Image (cartoon, helix red, strand yellow):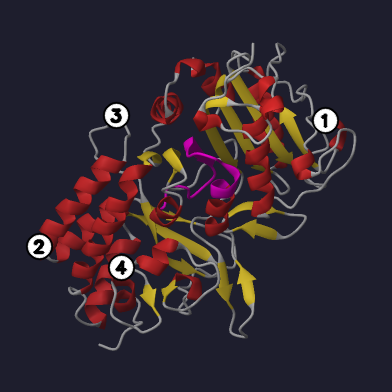
Amino acid sequence: MQLEVPSYAEVDNQDLAQKNKIAKWTFIFYMCADNNLESAAIQDINEMEAAEFDESEINILALLDRSEFYDDSNGNWTGTRLLKISHDAAGVNNKIISPEIACEDLGISLGTEKELDMADYNNLSALLNFCCRNYAAEHYALIIWGHGTGYRSFQLSDFGTQTKVRAVAVDGSSGNFMETPNLRKAIESGMKRKLDFLGFDTCFASELEELYELRNCTLYFAGSEGTQSESGWDYKEWFSENIAACTDGLSLCRLLENQHIQKEDSTFAIIEMSKIEKVFTAFDSFAIQASHIVKNKSVGSEIKEKLFLQKRAFRVYNSMTNPLYLDIFELSQNLLVFDSSLERVSENLLSALKSATKNRQWKSEAFYPIGIYFCSFDENNQLIEDFSSYYKHGSGAVNQCMFVQESVGYVFTESKSGTLLDRLFENYNF
């Protein structure tokens, strides 16, 4: 009897799909550990193996790229391998038992050392395509694992050359990073349908710039708007839950949310991605109105100082460029204090945030964890006045994210038109 493959799990090679029962879920991990997170990656693979999950219903595949420098366990191999996660009754013991998988799409053969540039979005696209063909499922989940710094991408230097600042998939061997627009391209080209779940086990994941870029790639998104520890998510706990019973991305998010509730982590976000366009529109409308209250440099300085000190502000430290992200809801409430005329657009923004964020309100404090880039500081904690062309509307920067291209009220502008950031950071002639 020939296995019928549903239309939403179309495959290029039907014979390969027929060898595998259509599972409930296929989880695909893109683990760039070719950096100082290598030991954390080994730990997380161990957690997946220690979980008690139904292997007939759940496929877990992990493309793991290791480093030469940080961890010498498990044979100390340093290339890139695709693993099919198997249960290990011995539990978390720092020993990987899951078998390697040969993947012609990625040029990975068994018993050979292959070094992939994880920052190359073509590799993620090829991985997704391979997994969908060979591990057909009713639902697909992609987890981006590793370092994350928000929306970042190309910027132009003073000499007119392109330089990169981090985003995701920080690859130590190549020295490259995957820009947010390229992440979108990888998912769009690698999948034949929307993901049911897209998770970022990284820092600075739930930022509006990223969410807006990826809004059509997945039904639900999970990640933190701030920083998180190197250990990240607890996969033994998550996959030991009744994952097979999850019928959509939201129910999968709920199981993951339990971990963050226990940690009292209010930065973790569950996002219904079909609602993000309304958040973008409401936020940009709010920013247009808010820009008018910045009537001069003195007012701008007063507002900036208040925003720098807001409770839900998230920073990167100890690098050449240290971005600051602000929680959108708290930002709007702080600006409302300066001018009550913002009340209507503030209420519209709150309504959009409530609709998009699906977090359970487990504390009395209201939170809708979506952040936004605000500014950057140098290694001496001094404000960087030369703003990246990548975050300037109209600059023509290469591979610029959609948020910057379409925002008319918030981001910096090449024409100094008087947006909120223009006025606050004096990119405007008062």
Q: Nearer the viewer, residue 176 or 303?
A: 176
Give the percent coordinates (x, y) of residue 211.
42, 50
Work out how far the residue at label 3 is from the one at label 4, CA to CA, in angstroms. Answer: 30 Å
Q: Secondary structure at mark 3?
A: loop
Give the percent coordinates (x, y) of residue 265.
40, 36
Give the percent coordinates (x, y) of residue 101.
78, 30
Number of residues whose C-alpha sits closer than 10 Å to that of mark 4, classed few (under 14), some (14–19) or many (20 or more): few
Query: Which region is colored magenta?
Result: 187-207
Number of residues whose C-alpha sits closer than 10 Å to that of mark 3, classed few (under 14), some (14–19) or many (20 or more): few
Q: Secondary structure at mark 4?
A: helix
Q: Is residue 388 visible?
A: no
Q: Earlier in the sequence, mark 4 or mark 1?
A: 1
Q: Amino acid at mark 4?
A: Glu
In contact (CB < 8 Å): disc 1 and disc 3: no
Checking the image for residue 74, the label placed there is: 1
Q: Earlier in the sequence, mark 2 or mark 3?
A: 2
Q: Nearer the viewer, residue 294 or 135?
A: 135
Work out how far the residue at label 1 is from the one at label 3, CA to CA, in angstroms. Answer: 41 Å
Work out how far the residue at label 1 is from the one at label 2, CA to CA, in angstroms. Answer: 61 Å
Q: Is residue 152 above or below residue 57?
A: below
Q: Secondary structure at mark 2?
A: helix
Residue denoted by label 3? 362
Work out how far the residue at label 4 is from the one at label 1, CA to CA, in angstroms. Answer: 50 Å
Number of residues whose C-alpha sits closer than 10 Å to that of mark 1, classed few (under 14), some (14–19) or many (20 or more): few
Residue denoted by label 2? 340
Tell me the mark number nearer the camera, choosing from 3 and 4: 3
Q: Amino acid at mark 1?
A: Asn
